[in-house]
Image (tube, rainbow, N blue to C red):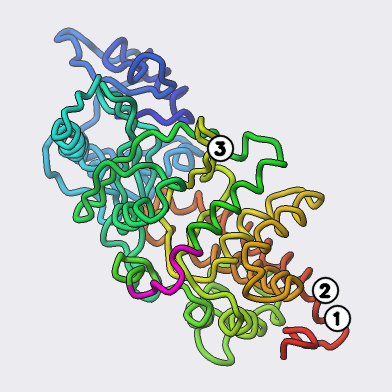
Amino acid sequence: MVAKPEIEHGLSALATVLEGAISLRRWSPGTATNALELHPLPPDWTPPQAFAWLPVTELDTVCLPPGTVGRLRYASQRSWAQWMEDWAGRPGTPVHGSAAPWAQSDWYPQFTEWVSLSLAGRHIDPQGAAVPVQQWGISAVYRQRTSAGDFFAKAVRRGVAGRLGEPLFGHEPAITRALAEMSPRRLPHVFDADSAHGWLITADASITAIRHLPYDKWELGVLALAEVQKAWIGQEERLTSLGCADRRPGRLTRLLSSAPGRRPVICAELPPEAARREDLWAAIADLCGLLEAGPVPSTVTHGDFHAGNVGLRPDNSTCIIDWSYAALGHPFLDAWLYIHRLPEVWRTRVAETYLNEWRDAAPIAELHRMLDAAGVVSALHQVLTYGEIIDSLEPTEQSDFDPIRLRWWRRAVDSWNRYETRYCHETGRVLGPDLQ
């Protein structure tokens, strides 16, 4: 069982109490990932003073000291007995209905067997066990050292539907392979993919994330993004056949709005003080309409394009990773996600670099206005996306993402304030004087 860093202190204390029955160790030499090892108790072992054995069936009814329940959130949402059943070592034991596949006790052996067989088919020998890099509700990533270098093995959730029924996340193996075939210099090499299970193996691209580089290198990220996006213009049917959700601006209008004349569905999920900008809600259809009718066509979008998901290889080529949220949509939504994180002094320069890649479509002033409109829509789309993520998680994980969703709402308001000041203050019209 992998031990998350935030609970390692508690596990260490528990290991002391149980006197060797459990221990924390490094998953493998040279890694920062710890694992929880369970050992049989000695036959003559007795609990320390003030501790007692309790039947697992009584765990859900035990009286805990005041304040303890808040620290044991798992107990309030999910039966302790069920949790123990999940990890009792019984292959195939059912888990919570919204739990990820890797919550199953027999998932890891099946996954790593597929990885080993795939490597063996190319005469590559695994060296040691696959080491967990990251696990959460929608994906699990492992690093596998081999005789031919390192590989990353990723599993994503299958069968998760969006607010309008589109499949989410599970298409990553298929779309990543297709993108890598089209733009091999801009994505990691895909070694193998199993779309039926949501499994993917890629070669280690050995990238240095852009976020760790000086700001004058951030332009490389948007240049790589534009290259991939432009390669997929006109391939809407292929993108949807690969499992990409339709997030084109016209579709987003329906996703973000519940019905004409009513507040959007996402409004009900935000605190009252966050949902009171009636002028923003009223502008959604116009902003999406501006993008839909504009000269820049829809294409593949990354959906989570930030400076941690793009980086430089040792040969200085730029590589984009983590396409879990890939969709068919307006390309400027991705660009804004990346550019808005920059300090103001660099934001204009990187925006100009990106927009210059689209200068054949429209004058640069019009492209800037579309990028500003895309900022409002992109931030609201992130509110929607995190709502869909929350829907897919176990109840005990959901509250961790509520603050993120609220932060995106605030960014949407900030972006709307800037757009309104820049384009609407003279006419009072959403689109500006020359785009009505």
Q: Compared to 333, does 246 lie above or below?
A: below
Q: Compared to 182, does 281 lie above or below?
A: below
The answer to the question of whether label 3 and label 1 lie on touching residues, with beta carbons closer than 8 A, is: no
Frontmost residue, 178 versus 107: 178
Estimate the x, y position of residue 417 in percent, counting from the top left.
Answer: 77, 70
271 left or right of 345 in image: left
The answer to the question of whether label 2 and label 1 lie on touching residues, with beta carbons closer than 8 A, is: yes
Q: Residue at x 47, y 69 (%)?
A: 299
Which span is picked out in magenta?
A: 230-237
Estimate the x, y position of residue 201 in percent, counting from the top left.
Answer: 29, 41
Q: Residue at x 51, y 82 (%)?
A: 250
Label 2: which secondary element: helix
Say which quarter of the image contains residue 404. bottom right
Estimate the x, y position of residue 419 in percent, counting from the top left.
Answer: 76, 72
Residue type at mark 3: give it: Ala
Neighbourhood count class around disc 2 (C-alpha, 10 Å): few under 14, some 14–19, many 20 upward:
few
The label on residue 241 is none
Label 1: which secondary element: loop
Residue type at mark 2: give it: Arg
Neighbourhood count class around disc 3 (C-alpha, 10 Å): few under 14, some 14–19, many 20 upward:
many
Quickly name the residue at label 2: 422
Q: Compared to 426, does 93 lie above or below?
A: above
Frontmost residue, 378 versus 219: 219
The label on residue 209 is 3
Separation of disc 3 and disc 1 at Cα? 39 Å
Observer able to see residue 105: no
Identify the residue at the far front of this view.
Answer: 360
149 left or right of 376 in image: left
Label 3: which secondary element: strand
Quickly name the residue at label 1: 425
Estimate the x, y position of residue 27 in percent, counting from the top left.
Answer: 33, 20
